[in-house]
Image: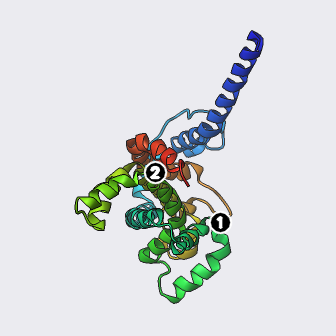
Amino acid sequence: MTRNTRIAKKAAHTIVVIALMALILVPFYVAIIYAFKPKAEVGVNRLALPEHWTLENFHQVIFQNDSFLVGFRNSFLTTVPSVLILLLITSMAAHVLARNKGRLYSILYTVLTVGILIPFQCIMLTVYVDFFNAGLTSTNIGYIIARIGMQVSISILVVTSFVKTIPYELEEAATIDGAGINAVFWKIVLPLMKPVNVTQLVLNTLFMWNDYNVAIVLQRTKESRTLPLAQIIYFNENTSELNYAFAFFVLSMIPILILYFCMQKHIVKGIMSGAVKG
């Protein structure tokens, strides 16, 4: 390979990386500048920095929009239990499915993971009718149940793949020493699942916190709206208040960013470990 060819390949690689970074960062740039723009500057020089930076948009969202506080409360009260329940049930289920090779367990694994292939749009009418008949629409409990059901397939797939990478000899040694199946799981297997559990904690939190499709089907009243639904107040057929909407968006993503930056060192490790075996 000639020197010119190496330079050309390096330049092409750099251009691709810069283009991908721009693709990812431009939406955040737009969101931030609009969140700090006064209303008079929203339609002028759309991608320019604000001439007069203001915090009024955030003040209006927090203190004058009841939907934000209601949405934040509902998002918190539904996301936290959903994520914790998923962590518990998928960890236990993945351990059972990974360590048993019988036909029944293979069928159970297939049934639990095939949900990944089914778009929510194909079942949303059935979901709404069933939850309506059960009296669970516009309730946090109903939404929690639905979101767990939507997320359990991908969680089982990832966690089961990770458990298969844990040496079975560790469990055999503990069993020989007199540990029961519960002690083996809670004291040996579960601590070793920390990377993948942190990964699914972050990803499931992200998916549930930002969920719109399930929320708009089940959360029908103003009092039950989560954050993605509460933001609709700034858009209608006559106008859109982009400065308030983006301030709302920035405030909404702060908890997710904090969680991600606190847990980021475990995320890649968990994803890569879970991908070693299938």
Image quadrant occupied by the C terminus:
bottom right
Q: Quadrant of residue 8?
A: top right
Determine which residue is flagged by label 2.
165
**Vertically, is 60 above or below 128?**
above
Within 10 angstroms of label 1, few (less than 14), some, or many (20 or more) residues?
A: few
Q: Position of residue 228 (x, y in %)?
A: 53, 61
Outermost residue on the left side: it is: 178
Q: What is the spatial separation of the Cα atoms under label 2 and label 1, in whole angstroms?
A: 25 Å
Q: Is residue 7 left or right of residue 35?
A: right
Q: Does 127 sit left or right of 100 as displayed?
A: right
Residue that lies at the very extreme toward the top in this rendered image: 3
Residue designated by label 1? 117
In the image: residue 175, left or right of residue 119 = left
Q: Quadrant of residue 30?
A: top right
| Image position, residue 145 (x, y; %) | 46, 74
Q: Residue at x 35, y 51 (%)?
A: 192
Q: Look at the picture and state if 245 lies above or below 261.
A: below
Q: Is residue 66 visible?
A: no
Q: Viewer-proximal residue, 254 or 165? A: 165
Tag 1, which secondary structure?
helix
**Image point (42%, 76%), residue name:** 141
Residue extending farthest to the bottom is 133
Q: Amino acid at mark 2?
A: Thr
